[in-house]
Image (tube, rainbow, N blue to C red):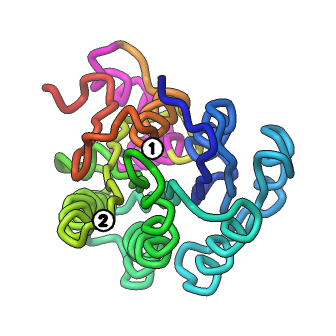
Amino acid sequence: MNRLDGKVALISGAARGIGAETARLMVEAGARVVIGDILEERGRETTRAIGADANAVFHRLDVTSEEDWNAAIGAATARWGGLDILVNNAGMFLGKGIEEASLDEWHRLCAVNLTGVFLGTKLAVPSLRERAKASPQGSAIVNLASVAGLVGSQLDPLYSMTKGGVTLFTKSAALEFARKGYRIRVNSIHPGVIQTDMGQQTFVSRARNIGTNDVDAARQIALSTHPIGRLGMPTDIANGIVFLASDDAGFMTGAGLVVDGGLTAQ
């Protein structure tokens, strides 16, 4: 189940957190992975840990740069003959309200969370389309959205705005590629609060917004919103990404997989 034997994947923001765990699980499932990130030292450490050279390589990737995307996609094609899977994982969290955020901060948030997804998708299409011709279930794009792309966010309405954009872009891209006969499936995944560096940022933001420096108390508030009784771990989301990228999800496109411990069920 969920095997990726012979497939080649490019994951943005894969030096740490959900991206790094996804890369590890994909290699375990038989894929070869290009780990893209602006964090070069951390990215190379992650690559060495999960199978450097044979099954994983690092490539510097600023998702706001068309040149970087073309180079990373070119590296996958040159090394392993093509690209079957794109995971648009890179993202950032601002943690500021509408009145507090500056225009420059908004532009940066959009550049990473929206432009990065657009560029990755646009530039990977030729490679994904070509490899899809020989694959029973075609190629796959998985976009990292968020529960904040499904419901409102008290902590970061601007982050929510960008992730809502990713949610509907996913559906629209899926429909466009289906109409064109590209055989590229496009799905999104919607994590709840996950125990990563970004997750920790949300605790700090929550503490600041309620007028306290008690990050542990803010974490408990976040925990209380998850009926399952715990916060998510990177593996929880990575497992979902591997599923969406695999042929087991061959009849899924334009869908959103919610992995949130019950947060949005309330």
Task: Determine crowd level at label 1: few under 14, some 14-19, many 20+ residues with C-alpha closer than 10 A.
Answer: many
Q: Residue 58 lies in what quarter of the image?
A: bottom right
Residue 140 in the image: above or below residue 173: above
Q: Secondary structure at mark 2?
A: helix
Q: Residue at x 62, y 86 (%)?
A: 67
- Mark pair 2, 1: CA separation: 23 Å
Q: Residue at x 51, y 54 (%)?
A: 85
Q: Is residue 32 visible?
A: yes
Checking the image for residue 245, the label placed there is 1
Q: Residue 4 appears at what percent x and percent y?
A: 56, 38
Q: Quadrant of the C terminus?
A: top left
Q: Provide the residue span drawn in magenta.
A: 199-228
Mark 2 residue type: Thr
The majority secondary structure of the magenta stretch comes to: helix
Mark 1 residue type: Ala
Task: Determine crowd level at label 2: few under 14, some 14-19, many 20+ residues with C-alpha closer than 10 A.
Answer: many
Residue 220 in the image: above or below residue 27: above
